[in-house]
Image (cartoon, helix red, strand yellow):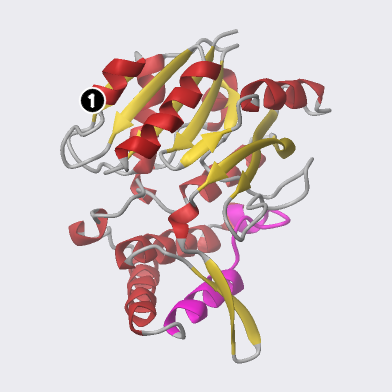
Amino acid sequence: MISHAVVVAFEPDLQAFRSVLESLCRQYDRVALVDNSHRPVTAQIAFQCGVEYIYSGGNVGLAAALNAGIAQLRPAPDDVVSCFDQDTEPAANYLSVLLDFMRRHPAWPRVVAQGSHFSPGRPNLAKGSTDDAHRLLTSGLTLSSQSLSDIGPFREDFFVDVVDFEFSARARRAGYTLAVCETADMTHGFGDASRRRRSWLLRTATSGHGRRRHYWIGRNSTLLCADPEVRRLRPPVVTSSELFRWWLGEVTSGRDGIRNGMAMLRGVLDAHQGVSAPLIYRFEASSEP
């Protein structure tokens, strides 16, 4: 078995990103770096670390970049593949602990897993219980190449946000168990500004994402909520009430929040009308892919 890692970068902090890449190289047999930046800013770091480098030519979206990296690596069916964001650094023993957890899991080999995500002020970002989560995050996601073939590639028309929720839904429909290994740790920036607050009688959440990212959150979440096959999953990967609470948290958080909330509404409307995302929402100078 060969271990593969795909990491996607978009205008990263090069010093911090080097640490992420070096951590991956110490644990994985092969690493592919897909640079989604407006110019190939990570090429030199990729050469110095000895990883396989792909420049996408611009921001093609997280889903398309992950698919390109996996295609470049061409893992064999028994190989294992992990996906990472540029702001996620796994612990030194992340892969070994996670693989041991997966092999001991009752659902093995039909299991998709990730470790626990940590960021300042938010101790564990994983959703659901350890052995049966209802959705996983993209970063740290680990599975066999055969599982990828069964589930299918990441959905590229989702571009960036909710890509992991949609993938989680297809994995569950394909008969795979989603699991979180609490002893495999990774630090994750997660937008670097997520916070919780109260709006009237509700506890809501806001994020550090810009308005274009909020467009994708509104559009893609709405598409999932409207999908009959996704709605049959219990528990669901995303709900209309969850989307509403997110929107409420934004519009009550100030001027930028109102702009974010309007972008989410635009995404919801486009999803209901079957409109493809306008080009303006595909690009944003942010630190996330």
Question: Callout 1: 10 Å neighbours few (<14), some, many (20+)?
Answer: some
Q: Is residue 247 magenta?
A: yes
The residue depicted at 64 percent of the width and 35 percent of the height is 174
* Residue name at image x 56 percent, y 76 percent: 245
Q: Quadrant of the C terminus?
A: top left
Give the residue drawn at x 77%, y 44%: 132
Residue 23: where, in percent of width, then height? Answer: 50, 25
Q: Is residue 158 visible?
A: yes
The residue carrying mark 1 is: 43
Which quadrant of the structure image shows residue 258?
bottom left
Instruction: Identify which residue, 97 or 173, lies in the foreground.
Output: 97
Q: Amino acid at mark 1?
A: Ala
Image position of 163 (left or right of 259) = right
Q: Give 105 or 125, whichever is nearer the viewer.
A: 125
The span shown in magenta is 230-251
248, above or below 288, in the image: below
**Whether residue 51 can be seen here:** no
Can you say whether 18 is above or below 280 in the image?
A: above
Horizontal arrangement in the rendering, residue 159 relative to residue 195 (left or right): left
User: Furthest-bottom residue in view?
Assistant: 200
